[in-house]
């Protein structure tokens, strides 16, 4: 696949549930690492209904050249004013290791710079790959919230 210069961040609407579900099905290792089964299409539909009621939440399909390559879910003014928290940055498993996650994060940081001072990222489950990814991107480990959630932070100021 040719690497495009920029991603298209396509806002997620409930009608896109099948595309998100397909991305999840194509990324089983992530769900295994966090200790859960791949969500069903009905689970994805319910999640999209919930996010419609949270005005701080931003969810996008990451596309390049018209192909869905990933998914990004973050929340503004969380856990505090002047911050945002990434709860999921998922690149299709077959495309991982090509720098797409780092590029998507860089584009998100550019969009958020000037709006937020700190960017948080959460890592669910026993996921050393994600912990290593966030550290390589300049995030510092902040704290663990129990055995299944780790927080990372990076200054955008």
Image (tube, rainbow, N blue to C red):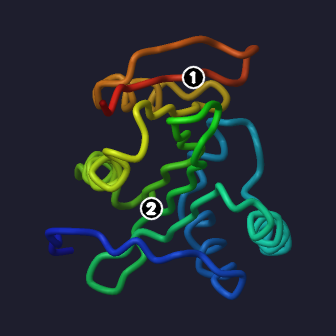
Mark 1, residue position: 151
Q: How far apart are labels 1 and 2 at the CA level?
A: 23 Å
Q: Nearer the viewer, residue 138 or 93?
A: 138
**Residue at the spot x=39%, y=29% of the render?**
134
Q: Nearer the viewer, residue 90 or 94?
A: 90
**Residue at the spot x=65%, y=81% of the render?**
13
Q: Nearer the viewer, residue 124 or 73?
A: 73
Q: Is residue 29 above or below residue 3?
A: above
**Quarter of image, res 78:** top right
Residue 142: where, in percent of width, then height?
A: 52, 13
- Disc number at residue 92? 2
Lower position in the chain sequence, tag 1 or tag 2: 2
Residue at disc 1, secondary structure: strand
- Disc number at residue 129? none
The quadrant the C terminus occupies is: top left
Q: Mark 1: few, some, or many residues within 10 Å (few <14, many ≥20)?
A: many
Circles 1 and 2, Cβ within 8 Å, touching? The answer is no
Q: Is residue 83 above or below residue 38?
A: above
Q: Nearer the viewer, residue 45 or 96?
A: 45
Residue 144: where, in percent of width, then height?
A: 64, 13
The quadrant the N terminus occupies is: bottom left
**Residue at the spot x=85%, y=69% of the render?**
46
**Residue at the spot x=46%, y=25% of the render?**
131
Residue 55: where, in percent of width, then height?
A: 69, 62
Q: Is residue 17 above or below residue 113?
A: below
Residue 73: where, in percent of width, then height?
A: 57, 55
Residue at disc 2, secondary structure: loop
**Quarter of image, res 116:** top left
């Amino acid at each position: 696949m040719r690497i495009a210069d920029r991603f298209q961040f396509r806002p997620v609407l409930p009608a896109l549930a099948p595309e998100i579900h397909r991305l999840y099905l194509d990324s089983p290792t992530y769900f295994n690492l966090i200790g859960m089964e791949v969500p069903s299409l009905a689970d994805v539909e319910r999640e999209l209904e919930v996010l419609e009621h949270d005005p701080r939440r931003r969810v996008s399909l990451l596309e390049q050249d018209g192909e869905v390559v990933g998914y990004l879910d973050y929340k503004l003014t969380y856990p505090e004013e002047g911050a945002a928290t990434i709860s999921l940055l998922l690149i299709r498993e077959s495309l991982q290791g090509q720098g797409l996650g780092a590029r998507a994060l860089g584009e998100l940081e550019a969009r958020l710079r000037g709006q937020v001072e700190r960017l948080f990222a959460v890592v669910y489950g026993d996921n050393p790959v994600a912990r290593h990814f966030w550290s390589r991107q300049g995030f510092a480990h902040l704290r663990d919230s129990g055995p299944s959630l780790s927080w990372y932070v990076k200054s955008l100021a």
